[in-house]
Amino acid sequence: MVGLRERKKQRTRRALIEAALRLFEEKGFEETTLAEIAAAADVSTRTFFSYFAAKEDVLFYDTGSRIELAMSLLAGRAPEESPADVLIKLIDGSLQMAAAYEELTFEDAELRMRLILTEPALQAKGLLVLFDTQLQLARALHDAYPDRLSPTEAAAAVGALVGAVKLAIIANLDNCRSLQEIWDTGRRAAEVTLAGLRSLG
């Protein structure tokens, strides 16, 4: 059970995310200041820095938790699970986490994605985050299956799967009207990619 202190931290974190998204939409990303985000969430600028290092980080709020989830799934895999089986579990877990994160809305998710795709500072950070997370996952996948996957095969599998899911979601952003539709799009892309990846291991 989550304690009172942790619930309060979760509420503050969510308030900062929602305030930032609202201000980014109203004023623009570059025009919005840290102080304005903190004020809109009814906290001090010092409190903002307890949760995020910069305003860019607000839009990548779930990166750490997604990596933790992936690592725990890899570490806890059953002996009989194939690399492809584990990878689809990672995609499912990541998509479900993104769709359910603290009750943020479809509009929040859509705005977040559009900002990352269009703002130069966020594009750069997004690429760094994408590369870093894929590298961590590829190494962890190889470590989980050292006798079945080479480092090259693990990297290719992770790159193909993550790339397919992200590109499919971005390509269909104008057609998706709910978080469930986004999830379904990503899941379908994963299934198509895994049809080829099942030859691994």
Image (cartoon, rainbow, N blue to C red):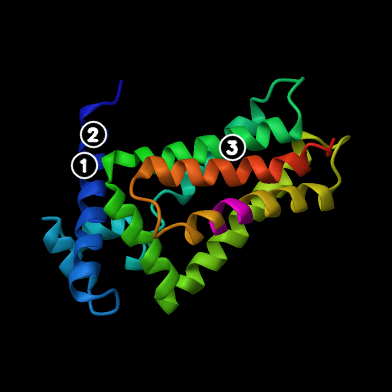
Viewer-nearest of labels 1 and 3? Answer: 3
Q: Which mark is residue 190?
A: none
Q: Residue at (50%, 46%) from the top-left corner? A: 185
Measured in 3D between alpha carbons, the distance from the residue under mark 2 to the one under mark 3, in whole angstroms, is 26 Å
Q: Earlier in the sequence, mark 2 or mark 3?
A: 2
Q: Residue at (73%, 40%) from the top-left corner? A: 195
Mark 1 burial class by Cα count in 10 Å: few <14, some 14-19, many 20+: some
Whether residue 194 appears in this view of the structure is yes
Measured in 3D between alpha carbons, the distance from the residue under mark 2 to the one under mark 1, in whole angstroms, is 6 Å
Above-or-below relation of 109 to 79: below
Above-or-below relation of 2 to 34: above
- Residue type highlighted by circle 3: Leu
Viewer-nearest of labels 2 and 3? Answer: 3
Q: Quadrant of residue 70?
A: top right
Which residue is identified by label 1? 11
Is residue 165 in the magenta section? yes
Q: Which stretch is magenta?
A: 163-167
Is residue 152 in the magenta section? no
Q: Which mark is residue 90?
A: 3
Percent coordinates x, y for residue 128 in the rendering: 56, 66
- Residue type highlighted by circle 1: Arg
Q: Residue at (87%, 36%) from the top-left corner? A: 148
Percent coordinates x, y for residue 45 in the rendering: 20, 63
Q: Check contact, mark 2 vs mark 1: CB within 8 A.
A: yes
Whether residue 67 appears in this view of the structure is no
Q: Residue at (23%, 79%) from the top-left corner? A: 31
Q: Quadrant of the C terminus?
A: top right
